[in-house]
Image: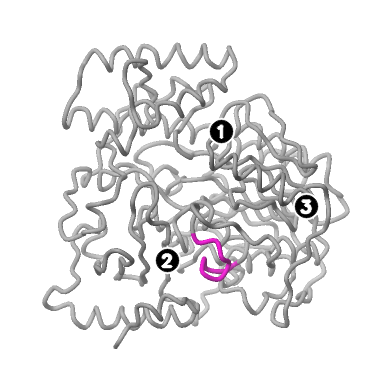
Amino acid sequence: MTSRQNEYLKRQLGIFAPIAAGLCVPMAMNAQDKAPEKTNEKPLNIVYIMTDDHTMQMMSAYDTRHIETPNLDRVAADGVRFTNSFVANSLSGPSRACMITGKHSHKNGFTDNENSVFDNTQPTFPKYLQKAGYETAVIGKWHLESLPTGFDHWEIVPGQGDYYQPRFIQMTGDTIIRKGYLTNVVTDLSIDWMENQRNKEKPFCILIHHKAIHRNWMPDTMYMDLYEDKVFDLPDNFYDDYEGREAAKTAEMQIASPHDMDIIYDLKMWNPDVNTRLKGAHRAIYGRMDSAQRAKYDAVYNPLIEDFYSKNLEGKELAEWKYQRYMRDYAKVVKSLDDNVGRVLDYLEEAGLLDNTLVVYTSDQGFYMGEHGWFDKRFMYEESFSTPLVMRLPEGFDRRGDITEFVQNIDYAPTFLEIAGVEKPADMQGESLLPLLKGEHPEDWRTDLYYHFYEYPAEHAVKRHYGVRDDRYKLIHFYNDIDTWELYDLQEDPREMNNIYGKPGTEEITKRMMKKLKENQEKYDDPIREKYPIEL
């Protein structure tokens, strides 16, 4: 366990022990977020499935180049696929805080994973659902550095969680170990709650939160040798030189770098005589396997290790070998996730719940699969700013196919409230997606999106930045210990390789995007506008 996880557990089982023991923590209420009124009498159930670091490129409902995800695609086939789905802050904890509050990071207070602790007394959509008569639960990854509130049942993993023999913190305050592979265990617990533990006289909302597909991409033993014969196509900008993009040059996310992508921790090439930055972390994960899991793991990876060190790869050969290993391990973890989404869908169908349940699948952000030579997320560039979002719609919703309007993860909370017949609180910054799910195209729907990333200095060294995106252009300002601007024409340059900020002929575009940026900062009341005022 890392020192950060230790501190996390101390806080949860120490400072917050009374909460874990079952004491009620009230919502911080004021005049504008008083308990909303219900607006209908037949609320639907909500099953919200969220993964970590899953990206559109690795979901066949969006992209068929790499792998197939038939169960995830089932969700979209029986409902809708959002083709312009984005996050407000591309990082695990902050993204979850945006989702559960319906507010941008500067409003919910959880801006980064390094220094933030989520204020669990603030209003969240599960608390409003409880007041409306729902039974609520969250199972799996939480990652908000304080205990869940607003849930009738919860069982969460400490920190990032463990792929093998995972630890879980329970509502009693106890931490237990459950045998097996985490993605399977989270699904087991979720189905058990829906079938055996909830009050079946009430509508319910369950958040099924997976660690998958988070680094270091450790697969279930049944899929250890999957994709080993597959060769993945190299992105055409894998060897990006980051010309004209100062912040990209200093980011530590390169697959080719021995510092950024660790040959032992990330790619499992164990060698007792080779020292790497994260070598010890790999051994800790390996040590969590039981003997049967370890035997299957060794049978696949030991020959790969022997072959790798015998070749002494360098330069482009090494970089492209690392890319293939990364893609294969990532794809293996997706396979288990897809299986388990299928298990949830099958359970809901067998239990007669599908017709009265909204099923949502998404990730906390996107991820780089070799684009720009990278892995990880954080940047406002498309691969990490966007996120998959598909919904299986219940009876009474006839909308099918693609929804092309701009949506953001701050929209989930108001959507769930309206689905439940609850009026959106005045201070929620997102918009309900219900009109879109009904097939409507509101004339006043947003035409641009606001983004703000805060976590620097930190792992991966991505500079702080904020920006705005419309249907063609994207404007980004990198700030703090840097002061640079980037402007992209997404129609002509979808890979975001050519920063046109300051180039002749872009003056009117820049002025228009600056105006939109200022309007968004004012609309969402981001205090950064006071430090870096925009003069039009």
Predominant secondary structure, magenta span:
loop
User: For residue 414, which quarter of the picture?
Assistant: bottom right
Report the number of discs. 3
> Given the image, on which type of amino acid does mark 2 rest?
His
Circle 3 residues within 10 Å: few <14, some 14–19, many ≥20 = some
Q: Which segment is the magenta one? A: 102-111
Identify whether 122 is placed above or below 355. Answer: below
Of discs 2 and 3, which sits in the foreground?
A: 3
Q: Residue at x 55, y 41 (%)?
A: 160
Q: CB atoms at circles 3 and 1 under 8 Å apart?
A: no
Name the residue at the bottom extreme: 536
Identify whether 3 is placed above or below 166. Answer: below
**Distance in Å between CA atoms under marks 3 and 1:** 23 Å
Q: Secondary structure at mark 3?
A: helix
Q: In which quadrant is the C terminus drawn?
A: bottom left
Q: Where residue 488 sits in the image (x, y, percent)?
A: 25, 66
The residue wearing badge 3 is 19
The residue wearing badge 2 is 452
Q: Secondary structure at mark 2?
A: strand
Residue 319's disc number: none
Q: Where residue 54 sits in the image (x, y, percent)?
A: 46, 45
163 within the magenta span: no
